[in-house]
Image: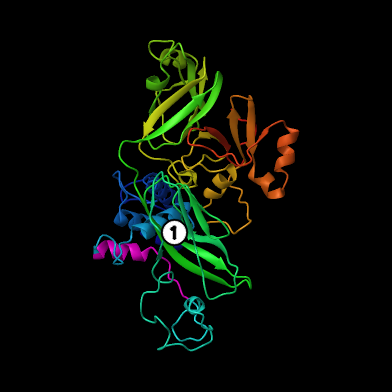
């Protein structure tokens, strides 16, 4: 791909093999190659042909994609994966080859040194030294590892499923400070408040590196590197519990495991039918316990797909005859980031998607999570057109739209159309919800 990109930059648009009449489009070949690589990107941002991401595969894929499109959305997630997988000694898997390729994916960064003494201004700010002071040779910590600057501050460890809280700090400026996420990602389930409080309940394990921004009362800003480690939940699985009402219920599988439809909704005395929307085919998939084949022949007759499983991150409808509680055991949770552009479950452009997520966010937080880079404080990104969730008890839609939140007109719009306000309600892992991509138009299918 790098060679093809070089040929295109020199003005070439196609080529033909000797002795053949067929001509091949160079831009088309590169586009197809990028599409193939992106199809191999995992939920953690890495690339591999196996189940687990590989630092070497990821570095090679990033370099190839960068040669075609340096702003491709898959690159940001891949870089985050490489950052999180770097070993404590600075290498990748103690392998010089992998380390060399991984380093080559990062753009060179020049830190400003106003005094031209080799000590970046950001370091002097943390050490309460004027940026114009020539400090070579006597700065405290010069030449050593400085937590928060060239090595991360280690936060209190967390664990999947356990409530967590930690208060970030800063020094050297004029209190009070305000805080925001400047780069990297917090573990799914945790959020950072402007006060510096990190709180929530982690839903995925791993090591998470991020950079936070601290702004003092005089609007001076410093950037501090941090890391939090999240331990896995105890073995045995995590329960996913649906509480059904009589009639149609819009449910979700926010877990990382697929759900066997017939195993949970196969009793004809309790359930009439189960439906999910297949965005790629733009049609419904159908299951009913009333037929011995689960309604497969019926579905084929009427142009539906046959529904056998609810996959991770999917929403679905269940028509129930009575109020029921149904519980499944799953192995993990789906993070909202997988629905980003370039993610493994990215939302289809200009279409409706019926989805679920496991990190228990408000619709506004879900919108923020779809951004490839954290938005500035107070900025409402427009990552989709609208989001809808169904209340089976009130028989009404909950409604959210980023553009209306941005303009301040969300509340009035919801009231004028008879919808329900989300308020502080979150998109629980058991909640299915419709997302209309920008340009989708109309109400849900």
Q: Is residue 258 visible?
A: no
Location of the C terminus by quadrant is top right
Q: Could you classify mark 1 by the number of other residues whose Cα lies within 10 Å: few (under 14), some (14-19), or many (20 or more)? A: some
Q: Is residue 218 magenta?
A: no
| Up-down relation of residue 38 to residue 283 (above or below) | below
Could you say where residue 250 lies in the image, as x and y percent from the top left? 54, 27
Residue at image coords 50%, 78%: 112
| Up-down relation of residue 141 to residue 15 (above or below) | below
Q: Is residue 166 visible?
A: yes
Q: Write down the residue under mark 1.
A: 8
Location of the N terminus by quadrant is bottom left
The quarter holding residue 67 reads bottom left
| Up-down relation of residue 242 to residue 77 (above or below) | above
Q: Which residues are magenta?
A: 96-111
Query: Tag 1's secondary structure?
Result: helix
Residue at image coords 45%, 62%: 9
Q: How many marks?
A: 1
Q: Farthest residue toward the left?
A: 95
The figure's colour scheme reads rainbow
């Amino acid at each position: 791909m790098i060679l093809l990109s070089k040929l295109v930059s020199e003005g070439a648009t196609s080529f033909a093999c000797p002795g053949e009449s067929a001509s091949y489009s160079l831009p088309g070949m590169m586009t197809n190659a990028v599409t193939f690589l992106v199809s191999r990107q995992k939920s953690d941002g890495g690339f591999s042909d196996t189940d687990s991401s590989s630092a070497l595969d990821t570095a090679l894929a990033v370099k190839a994609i960068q040669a075609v499109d340096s702003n491709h959305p898959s690159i940001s997630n891949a870089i985050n994966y490489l950052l999180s997988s770097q070993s404590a000694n600075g290498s990748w898997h103690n392998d010089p080859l992998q380390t060399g390729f991984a380093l080559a994916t990062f753009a060179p960064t020049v830190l400003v040194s106003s005094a031209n003494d080799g000590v970046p201004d950001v370091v002097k700010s943390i050490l309460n030294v004027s940026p114009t002071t020539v400090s070579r040779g006597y700065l405290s910590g010069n030449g050593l590892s400085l937590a928060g600057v060239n090595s991360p501050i280690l936060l209190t460890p967390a664990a999947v499923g356990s409530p967590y809280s930690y208060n970030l700090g800063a020094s050297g400026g004029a209190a009070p400070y305000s805080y925001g996420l400047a780069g990297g990602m917090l573990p799914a389930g945790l959020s950072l408040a402007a006060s510096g409080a990190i709180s929530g309940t982690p839903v995925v394990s791993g090591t998470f590196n991020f950079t936070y921004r601290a702004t003092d009362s005089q609007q001076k800003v410093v950037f501090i590197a941090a890391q939090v480690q999240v331990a896995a939940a105890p073995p045995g699985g995590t329960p996913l519990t649906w509480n059904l009402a009589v009639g149609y219920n819009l449910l979700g599988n926010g877990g990382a495991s697929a759900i066997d439809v017939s195993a949970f909704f196969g009793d004809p005395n309790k359930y009439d039918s189960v439906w999910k929307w297949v965005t790629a085919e733009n049609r419904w998939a159908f299951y009913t316990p009333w037929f011995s084949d689960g309604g497969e022949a019926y579905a084929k007759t009427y142009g539906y797909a046959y529904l056998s499983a609810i996959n991770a991150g999917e929403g679905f409808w269940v028509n129930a005859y009575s109020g029921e509680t149904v519980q499944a055991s799953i192995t993990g949770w789906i993070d909202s980031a997988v629905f980003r552009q370039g993610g493994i479950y990215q939302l289809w452009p200009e279409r409706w998607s019926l989805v679920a997520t496991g990190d228990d966010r408000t619709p506004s937080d879900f919108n923020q999570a779809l951004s490839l880079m954290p938005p500035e404080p107070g900025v409402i990104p427009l990552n989709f057109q609208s989001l809808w969730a169904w209340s089976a008890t009130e028989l009404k839609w909950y409604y959210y739209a980023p553009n209306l939140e941005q303009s301040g007109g969300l509340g009035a719009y919801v009231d004028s159309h008879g919808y329900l306000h989300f308020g502080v309600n979150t998109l629980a892992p058991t909640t299915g919800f419709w997302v209309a991509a920008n340009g989708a138009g109309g109400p849900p299918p």
